Amino acid sequence: MSVARCPGSCGELIQGWILGSEKLISCPIDWYSTVEVRDGTPLPDERPLTRAMVSALLAHFGYPQALSSALRIEVDSTLPIAKGMASSTADIAATAVAAAHHLGHSLDESTLAALCVSLEPTDSTLFRRLTLFCHHHATTQIACAPAPHFDLLVLESPVFLRTADYHRLPRAAALTAHAEVLHQAWGKVQRACIEQDASLLGEAATLSAIASQSLLSKPGFATLMALVESCDLYGLNVAHSGSVVGLMLDQDRHDVEYLRWALTQKKLTNHWPKQHLLSAVSGGVQLST
């Protein structure tokens, strides 16, 4: 038996046309999917992509596919699905690492990324550091210096949007139109990590969030931006292919209860009725010992 966990994400810090193609940097948070893989009969209600990952892993290591039917996968996750919180990436990345360990193998991050993108567009939460990632092909994996600490008030919408549906939208013109802005945002992310400056990271995320409005607009965005400004928060980040929004802050410095009150007063809770106060964390899949 082996157990591994991978964090979900509050959308992306940045996503757009960077270095010649669409890339992203996810925003890992302290909300995890935990997966156990052991010998046993598969469960009837398991998540299909986790089984697909086991099949991909067996092929990678040269095992017969028949072995899949002798492995049980159990997922423990409360991450909201189809909201832009990387729930699927968390499931399949944790499944891959747990299954590999159960079979006596390990996976480096690049191999894990390649396995994940073979199944679906993948978030960069599987990397230990903030990483500029080609989420379709895994051809770009540029790690940043360790990220500065920050917290988020995660705003959860009742709106569902499957990542695959988003990627079928006609987006090329809008992506390339904002290439210069995303180039600036990418530079700010790198500087923010080197200088340990959460405010600069918030600036980068806010630039990307504004650019994303032309691709997948968030309701009440101008009001949210005004709230970020008036409360002197670090910034605002969004799920570029989902509905979640993050208010980037320091819970020891900023008045979170006032923020919650203001969201209600400005009727923003009509769009985001659930809020979660979480910390940004290092990414990467962790094996339980």
Image (tube, rainbow, N blue to C red):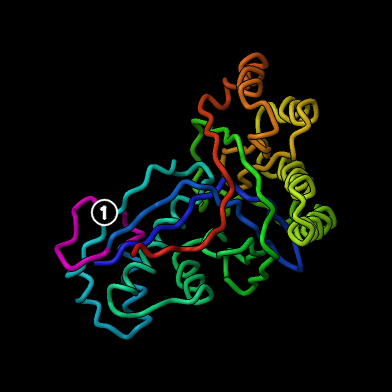
**Residue plotted at (66% across, 49% down):** 149
In the figure, residue 10 lies in which quadrant? top right
**Residue plotted at (35% across, 62% down):** 288
Query: Amino acid type of disc 1?
Result: Glu
Residue closer to the observer: 29 or 74? 29
Residue 122 visible in the picture: no
Q: State left or right for residue 105 relative to residue 183.
A: left
Residue closer to the observer: 65 or 245? 245
- Disc 1 on helix, strand or loop? loop
Residue 42: image location, x then y, percent: 19, 61
Q: Is residue 48 magenta?
A: yes
Q: State left or right for residue 104 relative to residue 149.
A: left
Report the residue marked by disc 1: 46
**Residue plotted at (74% across, 45% down):** 202
**Residue plotted at (69% across, 30% down):** 254
Residue 165: image location, x then y, percent: 52, 49
Residue 175: image location, x then y, percent: 74, 54
Q: Which residues are magenta?
A: 37-50
- Tell how many labels: 1
